[in-house]
Image: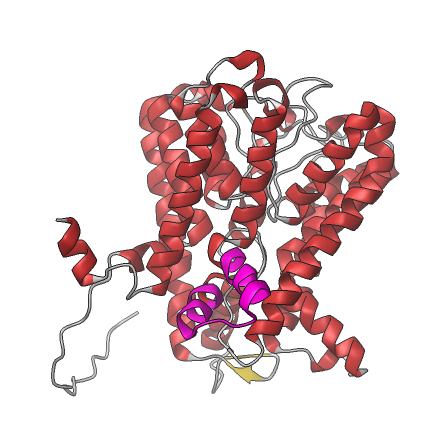
Amino acid sequence: MFTTFKRKNLIRKNPVRTVCFSFVTIILVGTFLLMLPISSNKGENATFLDCLFTATSSTCVTGFTTKDTFTQWSDFGKTVILILIQTGGLGLITFSSIFLLILNNKLSLKNMKLASSQINVKNFADIKTLFKNLLLITFICEFIGAFILSFSFCKKFGSYGIFVAIFSSVGSYCNAGLDINGMIYPNCSFIPFNKDYLVIITMSLLTFLGGIGVVVVNEIINLKKSKIKLQNLSINSKIAIFGSLFLVLFGTIGFFLLEYNISLREHNIVDKFFNSFFVSTAARTSGFTTVNFSSITNITKLFLCILMFIGANPTGTAGGIKISTIIIILSTVSYVIKNKRENSIFNHKINQQTTYKAVALFFLSLTLILIGGYLIWENDSSVGLSNIFFSVTSAFSTTGFQAIDSNLFSDFSKYILIFLMYIGRIGPISFALIFKLKAKSSKQILLPEADLYV
């Protein structure tokens, strides 16, 4: 059986399949390391499900937890989680390609295809420079973020605050919602810092930069060096920047109005705005929060589900169906309603195949959320329908927002959430391509056109 699998080269012939299996590898290695007695506090082994759940959440940069990260895991375990977040955020293939470049200063065409498919880059012209800049920009952003955050965290935690700052900075940039603030009280996220503007602004900026992606940041830097106007950015970068800014503003205003006299009632108006801004940014999809989500209304949960479902940029570390996908779909709707001659964005015609892919991704994602929600409802209806679909959307979009304790879910439901986190990280279309077999060659046949009623 193994020789048959090897002979067919099922993984090698499909770059997407290789990327998908690389995430499985990281998750399994992370699970094994977390199961070691040295990974848990007091030397007590965590259960296999808790380790798998935590490893998946870290690798898929989600932030869901069944155990408080600070309370359950030792410093070794926390370091394992930190490495999983960093590796999962950028991807194992990308990391290996970067280190190959550092060691040999060259990449094979195969490695270029693998790595570019992971960060959604199609142009190989400057791929080597991009990979080097990817590592440089990532570490610079995370270092500066950790340095700034250390002022607040060292004041709160002493010297241990340096590690908390590093962990929080990497988690923010990689859009992973795992934190180690549990020494204040378990599962508090950043609620104790809801009046600390330094923490709120720094982490929001890191989340935003990680969400739009290194490709966009690198393009902006190159434009600045060349003294070219920002209006000359590529269409993908324009969509990423303007789409992200709009969604952050829309989310901030929406959460501010919806929760003004509910979860934000104890804050003054300035604190309400900054906490709304933090939640809006985190919904795309870092998963950190400065607000207690157990007190938010169902309409707010639905509002956040929309933000989580959309997510951030395809070249970033965040999840969701991506900004470009929703913009293409909205543009297509406008194209049909206004009866335009061509479907376009920023005076660029949208490729028909790209439109098909966007529509397929939207409905595949929605279908997975509905099926996942239904399966969990059948097993854990007692937790409430709104909480179930909030958690399912949060898992699929790799956000990690939690309105309830994950341990209220049964083991079966936790495995479904694990599956959704994985699918959300690699993408439902990529997952479908794992099973794609080589199409049989056939003669091209001209089919009659069907005039269907809609």
Q: Is residue 78 above or below residue 321?
A: above
Q: Is residue 257 at all visible to an observer of this figure?
A: no
Most foreground residue, 193 or 13: 13
Residue at the front extreme, as displayed: 104
Give coordinates of residue 206: x percent, y percent: 72, 50
Give yes or no for residue 112 being in the magenta stretch. Answer: yes
The residue depicted at 48 percent of the width and 85 percent of the height is 342
The coloring applied to the image is: secondary structure
Q: Main secondary structure of the magenta part?
A: helix
Q: Is residue 347 above or below residue 386?
A: below
The residue depicted at 80 percent of the width and 37 percent of the height is 272
**Quarter of the rendering containing residue 214:** bottom right
The residue depicted at 43 percent of the width and 53 percent of the height is 426
Give coordinates of residue 212: x percent, y percent: 64, 60
Q: How many marks?
A: 0
Give coordinates of residue 97: x percent, y percent: 51, 62
The quadrant of the rendering that contains the C terminus is bottom left
The residue depicted at 28 percent of the width and 66 percent of the height is 13
Most foreground residue, 202 or 353: 202
Q: Is residue 59 above or below residue 38?
A: below
Left or right: residue 272 compared with residue 32: right
Q: Which residues are magenta?
A: 94-116
Give yes or no for residue 115 being in the magenta stretch. Answer: yes
Give coordinates of residue 354: x percent, y percent: 42, 73
Most foreground residue, 307 or 215: 215
Left or right: residue 193 compared with residue 168: right
Q: Is residue 128 at all visible to an observer of this figure?
A: yes
Left or right: residue 413 compared with residue 118: left
